Amino acid sequence: MTESILPLLILLLPLIGFLLNGVVLPLVHRGFSKASAQEAGIVATLAIATSFVLAVVSVSGISGPVGHGENPAVGSFVYQWLEIGNLQIPFELRIDRLSGVLVLIITGVGSLIHLYSIGYMSHEKCVGRYFSYLNLFCFAMLLLVMGNNLPLLFFGWEGVGLCSYLLIGFWYADTEKANAGKKAFIVNRIGDLGFLIGMFLIYKTFGTLTITEIGQAIASGTILSTGLATGICLALFVGATGKSAQIPLFVWLPDAMSGPTPVSALIHAATMVTAGVYMIARLNPLFDLSPMAMSVIANVGAFTALMAGTIAIAQKDIKKVLAYSTVSQLGFMFLACGVGAYQTAVFHLMTHAFFKALLFLGSGSVIHACSGEQDMTKMGGLKKHLPHTYLTMLVGSLAISGIPIFSGFFSKDEILYSTIALPAGQSHLFIIGVITAALTAIYTGRMLAITFFGSERLEHEKLHHLHESPATMLVPLYVLAILATFGGLLGIPHLLGGFLGHLPHVLSGWLDPVIHTPHLPLVGIQLSLHEGVVMVGSIILAVGCFSLGFRAFREKFNVSQFIPSFTGAQKLWENKYYVDEIYHTIVVVPLRALADFSANIIDKLVIDNIVLSFGRATRDLGKRMRVIQTGDIQTYALGLAIGLITLLWMGHKLLP
Amino acid sequence: MTSCLLSWIIFTPLLMAVILFLLPKAWEQHFRSWALIASLANLLLSLKLWYGFDGQIGGFQFIEILPWIPSFGISYALGIDGISLPLVMLTAVISPIAILGTWPKAGNPLKKERFFVAMVLLLQTGMYGTFLATDLFLFYFFWEIVLIPMFFMIGIWGGKERVYATVKFFLYTMVGSLLMLVAIFYLVRTQQEVTGVPSAIMTNFNSVKIPLDQSSWGAALASPQMLLFLAFALAFVIKVPMVPFHTWLPDAHVQAPTLGSVFLAAVLLKMGTYGLMRVAIPFFPQSAAMLSPFFYALGIIGIIHGALCALGQTDFKRLVAYSSVSHMGYIIVGLFSFEKVALSGSLYQMINHGISAGGLFMIVGFLYERMHTRNLADFGGLAKVVPMMAVAFMIITLSSVALPGTNGFVGEFAILIGSFQVAPVVAAVCGLGVILGAVYALKAYQMVMLGPVSGHEGVQHLYDINAKEIAAMVGLAILVFGIGFFPEFFFAKSKATLEIYANGLVPFLK
């Protein structure tokens, strides 16, 4: 590992931006809400954009050819954070080829979203607060991916959770939004406990928490039982289900949409929610030890993808569609992890960061244009009013639907193929994957159709204000559109690459030093018929389903309007399978009752009463004893006499 | 080592209190400044101590020994090691911060201001003395001294039910302490039988081996060592307070004036865990080890029950009081795990809880003084009205929920990862407190600061924190993030002591 100050600078720049916007500017302006969107936004954007430039420099430093067994990385050892006996936790940052990809996404997509926010937040108050949180988030997220030990990763992990909490509840005067932030934090904390326990188990097993050392220990043959490995992996995965919104802890992400839309794009689509996928890819030698945990991950991912896909098809709120779509796409990534195709998961993570950030920013542009309206059924016909937004969102939609050339096609196809081609793959995973891919194309087409086509249903006043977004918002949209279009070329499947003259799967080769997967289907030697069948099938499916969704849902918004027998399912999907209600009944209500019971019954009536009864008993004893103190000399003399006689008798009996 | 620095630290507040009584009544509005000056003087002395303290040495330093009552083996013996150093520093730092943060508002002076300030100073003498005494009788002496100012602070300047609360507090802690006194007598007598010379100096007890019959639970419980352990432990766990001996705490907190609450939460509770760490566990390690499952259980119950009770409160101050019960549970678990990392974590957590709980009580105080209510339902949306207070409250909340980067994380993490090595299930169950802690802390934050602005009439009297209060909060924030990012800087000097301490317990680790 090359020692370098760059990783530290990349990390600190957003923190400096946070301090400037959070502390210095309020001091200069003598107030929290005085800085303008331009001022605060430029400070924050410059901070993260400089980070991006430095990230490019660092990553290009590790891009040279590598020999067998080499793992190029740049790192900064900053200082010893915590040291108690054998527990050594250095504050050490590391950019290798895996974290490098993430650092580029975070700073690159992050810069675009910061820039976009300047336009988006221009009408808001307290923009200084907004931008400071956004910078703080980047700091925490960079720490998460660059930290070379699990406590540091956890530092970032909880830090992004905090920023997510603060930004979801940015408009805190609205109780519902504040609740959404709180829900996100608490649900994530449940997952974090799993992560903590996984970390403790790792420390107990390996005696270290440094990620590179854990990998080395496994490579050099540290024996650990399958049961223990499964325990560790599942505990860590519980953490991942929290942060990356998988079954059963996905419930916070849809609510998290109450934050400003650029936040949804950055935190709840492109970066933070992929932390669980990153963590699993990062610890891939560990996860390889437990086929059972891997199977759980693949299945949870698959079923989450399917479930969220069905919910997305029935939502009216444009951001809710995208939120469930994100849950679904994250499920795809876990599915890939679970069958051992880590680099495919990272590939999809990357393309998803492009097209989902694009879709969210596009939806933000729509919402901005429609004066805050989020209900798609009240929009319609926006295409001619918002041509740029439409064009870029169309690109994003084609990408997520898996239409060829666009990036999503490559990564999604790779995942689908992995589920049958890899030894850990299972046919039911493939089938679920195909169904979900079909659903994805349908709901994306539906979203696009309802929003941009059909009749103009917007309220008169909002229609009057309708305007295309300013350049600060459009530039990021176009940049992301380009990335969403061509990003997939980093992972050309072998079949196509072979046709076109041995084009390599760039990303897979790039990640090779970090993720060793012996069975990668896409760099295999023989041309597979399967691969071709899956590819052609998935193209037909994507094109067919996208145009179906796109054409069918212009004036009719729900599946049940076409197929009456789906009325029940429609209701189920609209209400998100009632999961929130179920959790409310089995967790929230009992917890409140238990808290009430503990506070008022156990503590007050039982414990405190026992304590007080000691006091009362003492007082009562005193009252009884008081009766003896009559003040009557004769009574006292009688007592004296009885005592004397007793003593004499005792002396007579007991003394020799 | 004849600088008497420790004596100066202990008696400067007392001296200042005596001088205070010589000041004319006309200067009443300056009495607080006097307390602040005294506390700052002590902070300077403590910093001198900190710089002078040699972190390489594991034993007591700055030792002072004078015979006091030789026939009973009682001496005036002081010393400081890596365990007491952080606690002395905590007291030294929290005192001026607490005084600044609870400054009475103009036109709103306290009745009997002179006596109040004197009690604040006397309290400091008691706290420093408890942490610095190395003679058991002297320890007991300062331990009890602390009760007096606290009794008056709650009883005179407390809320409506102050008499009930202060009597409960006083009697409860007194009963526990008396058993400790008996145990001290017994210990000194045994020591005299062994060595021929009576002495109550703590370090002299290493040679005294009091038997513990471990053949059966009944025999063990009747053994002198176990009885002595229980006598000490009872005094300490009442002070901590450990569930089920905690019910005096919410009442005392709710009735106490803010400054009293801050000292109570930040420092006084630590006397209990300090006692466990200083006396009960190292003097009677077999008994402590034998009972550790029992203490684990009570520690866990404390964490969970405390958190649930906090969640069930409608009174802001009571909520914070129960959060203390919950957080102190971690320290109990860490101490009885006998594991080095967890033991160190427990010491860290004592300091960290002092900072976060002290800060939370100050926030409650800010609001109560302005709005005259502590009812959570009366608040809401205040972040719009008092943004700086909201920031301060957020920082302390983060410390309280042990977010990495704040001081709270360092201690809690060390306790959990350390005790996980010897008792995985215990640590995992303790982890539930991590979740519940977030639930009640965020609930409190939201009910006070977020949502639409409350319609309570007190909101009209609400104004943001003033310069002194800002200074106090900035001081706390520096500690929160300073310890969170650079724990080694703050705790490096405790390393050698903790190393020896933990190694001494290794033979008893089951």
Image: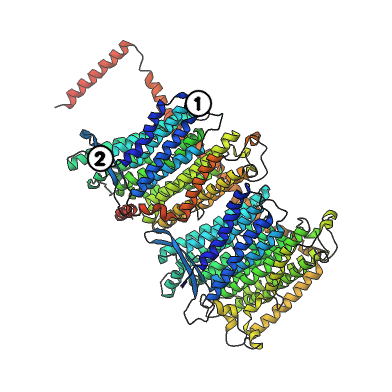
Quadrant where the image shows the C terminus of chain A: top left
Query: Where is mark 1, residue-wise?
Result: B111
* Residue in front for this viewpoint, A322 or B303: A322
Identity of the residue furthest to the front in this view:
A28
Q: In the picture, residue A252 is in which quadrant?
A: bottom right
Task: Look at the picture and state if A370 lies above or below A227.
Answer: above
Identity of the residue furthest to the left in this view:
A656
Task: Look at the picture and state if B48 lies above or below A101.
Answer: above
Q: Position of residue A266 (x, y in %)?
A: 64, 63
Tell me which numbered mark, 1 or 2, is placed earlier along the sequence.
Answer: 2
Q: Is residue A368 left or right of residue A61?
A: right
* Residue in front for this viewpoint, B48 or A211: B48
Residue visible at 20% across and 39% down in the picture: B192
Task: Look at the picture and state if A633 lies above or below A576.
Answer: above
- Label 1 marks which chain's residue? B
Q: Residues within 10 Å of mark 1 (few under 14, many from 20)?
A: few
Q: In the picture, residue A521 is in which quadrant?
A: bottom right
Q: Position of residue A319 (x, y in %)?
A: 71, 60
Q: Position of residue B213 (x, y in %)?
A: 26, 47
Residue type, mark 2 in image: Ile
Residue type, mark 1 in image: Lys
Could you tell me if the residues under marks 1 and 2 are in contact, i.e. CB atoms within 8 Å? no
* Residue in front for this viewpoint, B156 or B338: B156
Colouring convention used in this rendered image of the protein: rainbow
Q: Position of residue A482 (x, y in %)?
A: 70, 73
Q: In the picture, residue A140 is in which quadrant?
A: bottom right
Whether residue B436 is visible: no
Query: Where is mark 2, residue-wise?
Result: B65
Residue visible at 57% across and 67% down in the picture: A277
Residue visible at 18% across and 25% down in the picture: A653
- Label 2 marks which chain's residue? B
